[in-house]
Image (cartoon, grey):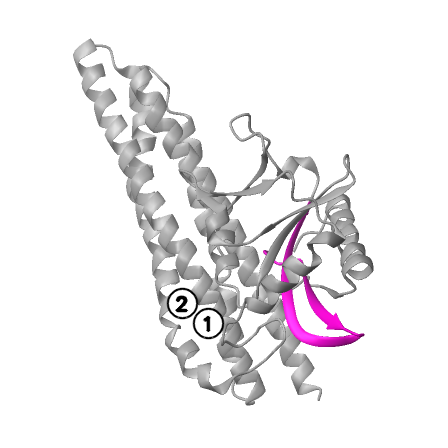
Amino acid sequence: MGKRYTKTERLGINKTENFFLEEFDWIFRDQPLVDVGVDAIVEIQENGNPTGQFLALQIKAGKSHLKHLKREPSNYVYYTSNIHYNYWLKLNIPMLFVVYLPNKKKLYWQYILDENFEETSTQWKLKIPLKNVLTISNKNEIEDFVRKFQKDTINVFTNDLKVETIYDYIYFEEYVDEFIYSIHKQAEYIDRFGTKITFFSEKIPSIQSIGEKNSFIKQVAVVLNLTASRLKNEMFIFSNSIIEAVYCYQMVSLIKIYFNQNFEAKTNHLKLISNHNNAITGIQDLYDATKNIPIIDDKLLIPKNKLLDVLRTLIAELKHSQELWQNTYSYLIKEFKSQTQK
């Protein structure tokens, strides 16, 4: 796996850690393994004693992560994937988005709540008001946010196992099957439409008559639009099912570890489903074939760009998914070794 943080990102982690330790006097724990969407966990403490009340942090650093749009002058905007959006909103602890801007030497923040997101054509955007500069004056407000947030689940960050939820997580294994089926469905669409799109790229330059050209343009536009729509729909199913699937694996595997059941079979299966390389390669090939379609008429421009946008997003989603599964595997192996050494 590649390097976890760049120098700038590490600066953001350090600045955030210093703030919560010095200003809020809360316990800060770096969170490098559990997933690709949580960078740290902080715990409220009172009079030097931990309270068991946690807050997850997604931490970014540098202005490259934010947009400052003219149509939204009072906000920064952060764009995120469907996988991160779904993962964050399904977390069993409250969450804060924090970004450090070195040029301003300030931390900006926003609650990870559904009401603060807006859906775009292929992603989600989170609005961070310019006035949301993280200071000591925000402590009571954020502390209230943490205290009001309660979910009766197994907490993967604190290993808080609640027996009454075990059967619910076993039931959620259905999402694993749905996730695998979604990967296969994407491959089916890629094979089906990839052949057609490659044919179009090769055929277009040889068309001579105006009548044939106009007819062919309509055919190509229909296929591009259908491909974009089918893959976009599948992408949303995939992004939703992976979240439940990952939680299922985390929780059911923790149960197996704690009750000394067969964990090895679970991790071997996880190794298999965490490898998306073939899917990523197939979508990249389709992207390249689509990009090579010559624009012989403006009617092809919009559907071509629409499909390219979906394919770019889908590749990013698959890469996020692969990293999420791989980090899940690393986390569970670490937990398994920790339990067996006790």
Q: Which span is picked out in magenta? A: 36-60
Q: Quadrant of residue 36?
A: bottom right
Contact, mark 1 vs mark 2 (Cβ under 8 Å): yes
Q: Nearer the viewer, residue 100 or 256?
A: 100
Residue sitting at 73 percent across and 75 percent down? 50
Residue 248: numbered disc: 1
Q: Nearer the viewer, residue 286 or 237?
A: 237
Q: Quadrant of residue 106?
A: top right
Q: Is residue 182 positioned above or below 124 on the image?
A: below
**Circle 2 SS class:** helix
Res 263 seen here:
no
**The residue under label 1 is which amino acid type?**
Cys
Q: Nearer the viewer, residue 243 or 318?
A: 243
Cα separation, mark 1 vs mark 2, equals 8 Å
Q: Which residue is mark 2?
A: 176
Res 143 seen here:
yes
**Quarter of the image where the N terminus is located:** bottom right
Q: Taking 114 as reference, is 138 left or right?
A: right
**Circle 1 SS class:** helix
Counting from the top left corner in percent of width and height, residue 123 is at 46, 42
Q: Is residue 50 positioned above or below 76 on the image?
A: below
Question: Badge 2: how crowded within 10 Å, few (<14), some, or many (20+)?
Answer: many
Q: Nearer the viewer, residue 116 or 143?
A: 143
Counting from the top left corner in percent of width and height, residue 177 is at 36, 67
Counting from the top left corner in percent of width and height, residue 126 is at 53, 44
Residue sitting at 48 percent across and 62 percent down? 90
Q: Taking 131 as reference, is 278 left or right?
A: left
Indicate yes or no whether the magenta region holds residue 139: no
Residue sitting at 51 percent across and 45 percent down? 316
